[in-house]
Amino acid sequence: MILSDLLGSDAFDAEGRRLGAVLDVRLEISGAPAQLLAETVVTGVLVSSHSRFSTWGYERRGEDGPFLIAWLQRRLHRGSFLVAWDDVELVDVGRVVFRAGYEQLDPMLPQAPREA
Amino acid sequence: MNDHHEHDPGHEHDRGDEQDAGRRMPRRDPRAPRGRVLDAHLHLLDRQVLDREGVPVTTVDDLELDGIELGVRIQPGSPPPTLAAILTGPQLLMRLFGGHAPAARRIAIPWKLVSEVGTTVRLGVDADSLDASWVERWVSRHLIGRIPGGRHDPE
């Protein structure tokens, strides 16, 4: 499957209520060791109830400048959340359905190590 | 209120965001990350891909995920999908305007060739060994190479 088919898909809960749109896919470089990097696995999907487009990830990082852009971005993506891949029940064309009792998690990214 | 927070070391959502005080804050992902965490769109799409020597190869136009079957219920506990390849070529236009390039027209760089992900995506191989750089090779051989002096460095 191609990533862009998943981005912008509508996200639904098990009862069929629309929750928002898939904004991004969270990955983790933590699978089976490979030749260069470890395998990169999908660990969750980010959902925004207000926007279909991911922009600069202000809602996922602690950064807050420039103020006006940060404020607008936060406002646009308020209420966005992360759903673990284990809670995804079905992926179809333009549609992602979560399992009953899925949990909405904080979309914040863990602090990345600063590169030299 | 403050006393409550002091006695609750597990409370991780006190980010001082007074505006959000009335809204239920989702809890943090309880699973500790076991490796580098990336968001596919935020950290990978449109990034430049460099080869082993730092020569630009292409950009990440799209990504191919393995292990997602459309319309099939995912059994609980089944292994998560994995990142299979970086897609380039006509893929950018498809991403912007919609539609699909036939699989034969997609130029894929297998993800297993990636050695590092930072501001750019670094590969562990030379650009010349990849299908993604065939246009560059063709132009250098058939067009630039035919111009007098086009086959050697400037003197």
Image: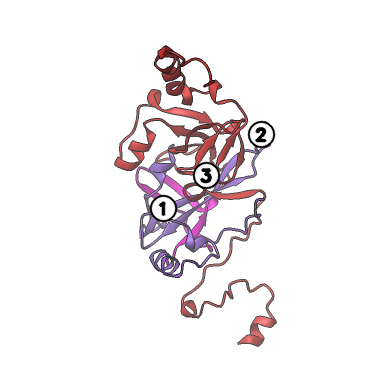
Chain colours: A purple, B red
Residue topped by disc 1: A22
Q: Would residue B65 be counted in the magenta stretch?
A: no
Q: What residue type is labelled 1?
A: Val
Q: Which amino acid does label 2 sit on?
A: Leu
Q: Would residue A102 be counted in the magenta stretch?
A: yes
Chain where mark 3 sits: B
Discs 2/1, front: 2
Q: In which quarter of the image is residue B155?
A: top right
Q: How far apart are marks 2 and 1 (CA)?
A: 30 Å
Residue at 46% of width from left, 51% of height from top? A24
Magenta residues? A78-106
Sequence-first disc among 2 and 1:
1
Please tell me how crowded label 3 is: few (under 14), some (14-19), or many (20+) other residues with Cα within 10 Å. Answer: few
Give residue B135's position: percent from left, percent from top: 42, 22
Under circle 2, the secondary element is loop
Residue at 47% of width from left, 29% of height from top? B108
Q: Which of A80 and B91 is in front in this view?
A: B91
Relative side of A56 to B36, left or right = left
Q: Which amino acid does label 3 sit on?
A: Gln
Residue topped by disc 2: A36
Give residue A77's position: percent from left, percent from top: 41, 63
Discs 3/1, front: 1
Which quarter of the rendering shows the N terminus of chain A? top left
Under circle 3, the secondary element is loop
Chain where mark 1 sits: A
Residue topped by disc 3: B75
Residue at 66% of width from left, 87% of height from top? B3
